[in-house]
Amino acid sequence: MITLTGKKVSEGIAIGKLTFYKREGKEIRRIYVKDVEKEVQRFQKARQKAIQELKVLYDTAAKEVGDANAAIFEMQQTILEEQTLVDRVNSIIVEDKLNAEYAIQTVISEYLSNEDTENKIYTPGHDVDVKDVANRLLRVLSRSWKDKMLMDEPFVMAAGELYPSEAVQLDKNKVLGFVTRYGTINSHTAVLARTKGIPSVIGLGEALKKDYDGKMIVVDGYEGKVYIEPDYTTLTKMKQKQDTNVTHVKNLERLKGKENITQSGQRIDICANIGTREDIENVIRSDAGGIGLFRSEFLYMENGPKLPTEEQQFQVYKLAAESMGVKKVVIRTADLGGEKQADCLDVGHESNPTMGMRGIRISLEKEEVFKTQLRAILRASVYGNVSIMFPMITAIEEVTRAKLLLETAKRELKAEKTAFDEDIQIGVMIETPAAVMISGELAREVDFFSIGTNDLTQFTLGMDRTNDKLGKFYNSHHSALIKMIRIVANNVHLEGKKISICGDLAADLDLTETFIQMGIDELSVTPNQVLALRKKIREIQ
Ligand code: PEP
Ligand code: MG
């Protein structure tokens, strides 16, 4: 048994087979193989699978766009069935003792650069199809993780580092847990793991070796420990821990329907944070008082190269609104940029993206994209208790401009005779020291506030929340931060407005009492933290 220690990111125990995540589009490496027969078999299997996929594609396309247009997939099949291609790939594997991926890439490059049109294995002008075929073969060979999520048994994922755009796509039913070499507990990947309730340990360093691929692993998200090929005693202990957690969660369930009230009668609301459509169900199960933060940017990040349309967004927001009934749903407009990069919205290269084009700045630069989102939120507002929140605010002008665009969206909808809530509430995130200092003025502009302690901490301390070297310096209980939260609460309350905390600190049970004393109106946490927080509140004098 090998024991590794890292940083705990998301609680829970995961037990399963370890699978290393292969990032798509990765450079193909030239690797010597010992068992060439096995490698030839790998290639043959991948080729058969690719042919099979193309047959399905042909049938689907023929139905949808007709035989003539579908013929391209038939042509791609013939490329894969071409004996000279098969022989050439096999010969590189067998004679040069090289891996199938490298052999395929070599042969395809040879074909593409071959000027001899007479001897081409495919019709000239179809280079793009040859590339497409090669990509298909390579993807099948690499068994991309997205395919894995569709087909395989549940597994524990391992990676050097996992980006938020990748973490957002993890299917909780397939990914039992994940472990990484690098990363920090404050990153958005960590936030997503907690929101989805996927047990995870990160920052295991080089000790997390590729050799462990396929081995049995236990992830202890409570302790930040990982056991590779656990011995009988450890496995039994971990299974017990898993069962104890089930009992613990069951005990917490008794608090469903109960109030969030201290012994002395002070109340505070608890809401839940979500990122995707799938999380809505968890909020319903959690008995939260609503959705305090819908990180809508994840809809953009999981949508590939295309921007999510107004209709697409409307459907998700409407589902959230309807599912919550009278309970509130705070939709934060897209907080893209920084480490939350989406393929569909290129902000260009930046040397310091965390302090670059982010959140409201992008929205104000890309007015049409912003207006599409505002229209979708407005349309959803008639289906429940929806409000809008703007992220990364630093100045009053940003709020004024955002509100003007909201008015334009409202006017458009009115002209189209589309229903929306005329009095939709508007809030802002307090994530920058600037926003803290002008919170009094901001309180005269908007209806409510939510403190994003994750960003507020990094900007107050001047420390990157994703830099894993800063662990010991990164003090999330820093008195400067607590003072800032107090200042905001006082300023906002003076104007008779409400204040919530939706950053990770909201779930920090060591601070619950402090927040209640400050008069914070609401804490918004991940769905699976709701009942533990309720328990804590009810125990406070
Ligand atoms: C925050 O900064 O605390 C916050 C809630 O926003 P995010 O974590 O998505 O940046
Ligand atoms: Mg933030």
Image: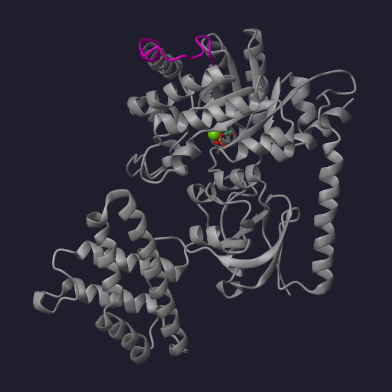
* Quadrant of picture, ligand 1: top right
Residue 96 percent coordinates (x, y): 34, 89
Residue 7 percent coordinates (x, y): 67, 54
The answer to whether residue 417 is magenta is yes
Residue 510: tell me if it is visible: no
Q: Is residue 20 above or below residue 1?
A: above
Assign the N terminus to one quadrant of the image: bottom right
> Picture quarter containing residue 154?
bottom right
Instruction: Report the label total.
Output: 0
Residue 396 percent coordinates (x, y): 46, 15
Q: Is residue 235 above or below residue 527?
A: below
Q: For this view, does 121 lie left or right of residue 70?
A: left
Q: Residue at x 74, y 18 (%)?
A: 519
Q: For this view, does 137 lie left or right of residue 279?
A: left
Q: Is residue 62 above or below residue 139?
A: above
What span is in magenta? Answer: 412-427
Q: Residue at x 66, y 54 (%)?
A: 200
Q: For this view, does 498 lie left or right of residue 459?
A: right
Question: From this viewpoint, which residue is outermost toward the bottom?
Answer: 95
Residue 452: tell me if it is visible: yes
Between residues 511 and 219, which one lies in front from this camera angle?
219
The answer to whether residue 183 is magenta is no
Give the colouring mode of the picture.
Answer: one colour
Q: Is residue 82 above or below residue 134?
A: below
Between residues 442 and 25, which one lies in front from this camera angle?
25
Assign the C terminus to one quadrant of the image: top right
Residue 85 percent coordinates (x, y): 27, 80
Q: For this view, does 167 lie left or right of residue 522?
A: left
